[in-house]
Image (spheres, grey):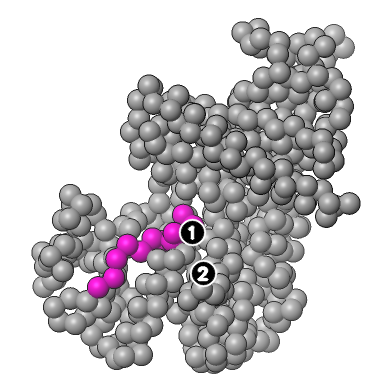
């Protein structure tokens, strides 16, 4: 689709191409950034018919909020520039995202659970970033999106994640520092009762919208059906109509009860009855996903009397590990992938004295990550085992992000947020003594994803590996006192 602006050059830099999308407030163009060799970007304009100072201010605030959030999360569209053209029309420049909206991806049928969990994890991480807040004038201010719906979620192909999900359109986002509500704004089918009332909102308004959207993803139907598709009709439905039961939808479903419960909790009529944060929703979904994976794991075939049963759980498979013949029997650490079901487990293999294993095996490990992008992209994956404030063991493991094993382990860490330590004893045989499951906090998963994307765009040579590794070692030595102090504070709190 072309129009009169095709080929127009904005501020001697952005050459407009085709219209990429239209909305009530304006339109988005695909454009070339001539300053950066023709990189394709998206340029959003305000509609002339909407032009007034209040709308201009809100448009600029949308660009500011998106720019600040886009720097914190890969799950929010990045804003790169803001300007005014020769006719005093404001615009801002975003990364160009070629993909489908969640609305298109749903295809009017229930979404398979693996895809649902993957998409929801990423949507929650994007919303979590907004709700955690941005710094404006030295103060951290929470952001409520106010328009969470399938058409404001986009899915693009990504080499690391397979499908990268991003939250779009902060055009009507609300800053918690705003002194008074601005009246009703949003999409009626997805708005919370308090948003329909034009009341002051917090993050739980977005959680309500998230609940409506999750129901739609799982069933291909909306949970509410107003008598009339008008503001008044939706107002009545959101306030007084009970959401449809999962058993009432047309498509046959086989969903975990816990999943149906969390969706219904998100759609509670009052904010106080909903989960208090997106972080809480994310934790529940991750636990349900983990339980579902274990329940759906294929059962081992019946063994004959002469054979042992085939291990089916991640724990059992890891316990079958034996020390590689090409590795020395010494206190070393290295990464390893273990086949599991249709995928692989990210593991760290460790050899320690038996006394150390006995000392640390019942405590959860603490994970930390350091990254250098140049001259060669490398990740230092540091796991610390500890017993008390004085006794701890740091286990550094280096991942070359230009090697398949490094790329794959990083991908698994970002997708699952978990890994396993496989421990072997110096004094024992080649068999695994025990395993310990480790978790990667959500805020660190976000960093890992950003580093993964950065490493893909970095060209490097083999000779630069040592330089990057040396840089990481120096950074670790400088960071150790802070890590130990942080660990001691955590232990003291538990005690």
Q: Element at badge 2?
A: strand
Badge 1 is on which residue?
A: 72
Q: Residues within 10 Å of mark 2 (few under 14, many from 20)?
A: many
Q: Element at badge 1?
A: helix
Q: Could you say which quadrant of the image residue 390 lies in?
A: top right
| Mark 2 in CB contact with mark 1 (< 8 angstroms) | yes
* Residue drawn at (43%, 61%) of the image: 70
Gap between marks 2 and 1 measured at Cα: 9 Å
Q: Nearer the viewer, residue 216 or 367?
A: 367
Q: Nearer the viewer, residue 16 or 378?
A: 378
Residue 265 appears anywhere in the view: yes
Q: Nearer the viewer, residue 256 or 330?
A: 330
Residue 406 marker? none
Q: Could you say which quadrant of the image residue 332 lies in?
A: top right
Where is residue 459? Give x, y as percent: 33, 33
Where is residue 95? Give x, y as percent: 33, 58
Badge 2 is on which residue?
A: 134
Decide if residue 292 is on the left or right side of residue 130.
right
Q: Residues within 10 Å of mark 1 (few under 14, many from 20)?
A: some
Q: Is residue 434 magenta?
A: no
Residue 229's place in the image compared with 82, above or below, is below
Where is residue 301? Give x, y as percent: 76, 23
Q: Nearer the viewer, residue 344 or 293?
A: 344
Q: What count of labels does the image hold?
A: 2
Residue 472's place in the image compared with 288, above or below, is above
Decide if residue 267 is on the left or right side of residue 408.
right
Residue 12's place in the image compared with 441, above or below, is below
Decide if residue 443 is on the left or right side of residue 186.
right
* Residue drawn at (36%, 90%) of the image: 54
* Residue drawn at (38%, 22%) of the image: 462
Q: Magenta segment, which residues?
A: 70-83
* Residue drawn at (70%, 33%) of the image: 394
């Amino acid at each position: 689709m072309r129009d009169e602006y095709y080929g127009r050059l904005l501020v001697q830099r952005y050459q407009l191409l085709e219209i990429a999308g239209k909305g009530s407030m304006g339109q988005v163009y695909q454009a070339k950034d001539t300053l950066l060799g023709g990189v394709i970007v998206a340029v959003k304009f305000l509609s002339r018919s909407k032009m007034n100072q209040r709308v201009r201010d809100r448009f600029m605030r949308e660009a500011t909020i998106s720019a600040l959030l886009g720097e914190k999360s890969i799950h929010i569209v990045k804003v790169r520039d803001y300007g005014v053209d020769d006719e005093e029309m404001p615009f801002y420049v975003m990364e160009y995202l070629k993909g489908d909206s969640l609305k298109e991806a749903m295809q009017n049928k229930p979404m398979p659970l693996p895809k649902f969990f993957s998409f929801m994890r990423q949507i929650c991480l994007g919303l979590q970033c907004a709700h955690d807040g941005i710094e404006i004038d030295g103060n951290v201010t929470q952001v409520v999106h106010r328009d969470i719906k399938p058409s404001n979620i986009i899915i693009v192909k990504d080499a690391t994640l397979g499908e990268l999900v991003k939250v779009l359109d902060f055009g009507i986002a609300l800053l918690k520092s705003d002194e008074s509500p601005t009246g009703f704004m949003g999409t009626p089918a997805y708005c919370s009762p308090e948003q329909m009332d034009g009341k002051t909102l917090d993050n739980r308004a977005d959680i309500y919208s998230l609940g409506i959207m999750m129901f739609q993803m799982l069933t291909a139907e909306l949970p509410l059906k107003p008598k009339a598709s008008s503001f008044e009709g939706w107002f009545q439905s959101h306030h007084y109509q009970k959401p449809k039961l999962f058993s009432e939808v047309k498509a046959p479903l086989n969903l975990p009860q816990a999943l149906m419960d969390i969706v219904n909790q998100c759609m509670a009529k009052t904010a106080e009855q909903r989960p208090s944060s997106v972080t809480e929703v994310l934790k529940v979904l991750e636990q349900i996903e983990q339980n579902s994976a274990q329940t759906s794991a294929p059962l081992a075939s019946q063994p004959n009397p002469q054979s042992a049963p085939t291990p089916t759980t991640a724990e059992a498979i890891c316990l079958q590990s034996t020390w590689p013949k090409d590795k020395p029997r010494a206190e070393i650490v290295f990464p390893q992938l273990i086949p599991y079901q249709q995928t692989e487990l990210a593991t760290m293999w460790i050899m320690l004295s038996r006394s150390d294993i006995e000392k640390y095996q019942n405590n959860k490990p603490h994970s930390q990550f350091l990254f250098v992008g140049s001259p060669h992209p490398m990740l230092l994956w540091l796991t610390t085992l500890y017993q008390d404030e004085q006794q701890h063991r740091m286990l550094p493991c280096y991942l070359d992000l230009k090697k398949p094993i490094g790329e794959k382990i990083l991908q698994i860490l970002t997708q699952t947020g978990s890994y396993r330590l496989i421990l072997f004893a110096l004094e024992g045989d080649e068999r695994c003594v025990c395993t310990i499951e480790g978790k990667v906090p959500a805020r660190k998963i976000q960093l890992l994803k950003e580093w993964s994307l950065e490493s893909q765009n970095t060209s490097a040579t083999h000779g630069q590996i040592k330089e990057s590794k040396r840089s990481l070692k120096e950074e670790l030595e400088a960071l150790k006192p802070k890590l130990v102090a942080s660990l001691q504070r955590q232990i003291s709190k538990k005690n």
